[in-house]
Image (cartoon, rainbow, N blue to C red):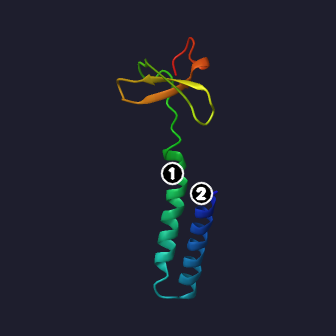
Amino acid sequence: MLRLLLLGFAILLVLAGLVCTIAGADGAWPFTLWGLLLVAAVLLERWRYSHTPKADDGPWQETGERFVDPESGRVMSVWYSPDSGERRYVPISENDNQLP
């Protein structure tokens, strides 16, 4: 929801800056610049943090740690990649014979 509001605000900011620039208002270009930067930031943020690593991207080791996920109530197992230092949390029922 917040993402959509920011995107809408940024688009309005770009449009306002363009209209003011076309109308000949002095100093209207910062509205367009900041609007374009905000649009780019909102759109690139989703791409930047949507990376989902593959199961075969390195050797994974089960740490033996277990905990109950407070959101789902499921028991989770912790896996660790010595290559990247990344940790993954996998439901116990899903890691019987497979890596995360």
Residue 25 tag number:
none
Q: Residue at x 48, y 64 (%)?
A: 37
Q: Residue 82: horizontal and vertical position, in percent?
A: 35, 23
Q: Mark 1 and mark 2: span between their CA atoms?
A: 10 Å
38 left or right of 74 in image: left
Residue carrying label 1: 45
**Vertical placement of residue 64 versus 35, above or below:** above
Residue 5 in the image: state x and y as whole percent.
62, 63
Amino acid at the residue labelled 2: Arg
Q: Residue at x 51, y 59 (%)?
A: 40
- Tag 2 or tag 1, which sits nearer the N-term? 2
Kindly indicate whether the residue at mark 2 contacts the one at mark 1 (C-beta within 8 angstroms). yes
Query: What residue is at 51 percent from the left and 66 percent from the top?
Result: 36
Q: Position of residue 85 (x, y in %)?
A: 36, 29
Give the class, few, some or many, for how many residues have Cα within 10 Å of label 1's Cα (few <14, many ≥20): few
Q: Nearer the viewer, residue 85 or 57?
A: 85
Q: Nearer the viewer, residue 69 or 84?
A: 69
Camera-side mark, 1 or 2: 2
Q: Residue at x 54, y 78 (%)?
A: 17
The answer to whether 4 is drawn above or below residue 50 in the figure is: below
- 61 to 73, vertically: above or below: above
Mark 2 sits on what residue?
Answer: 3
Mark 1: amino acid? Glu
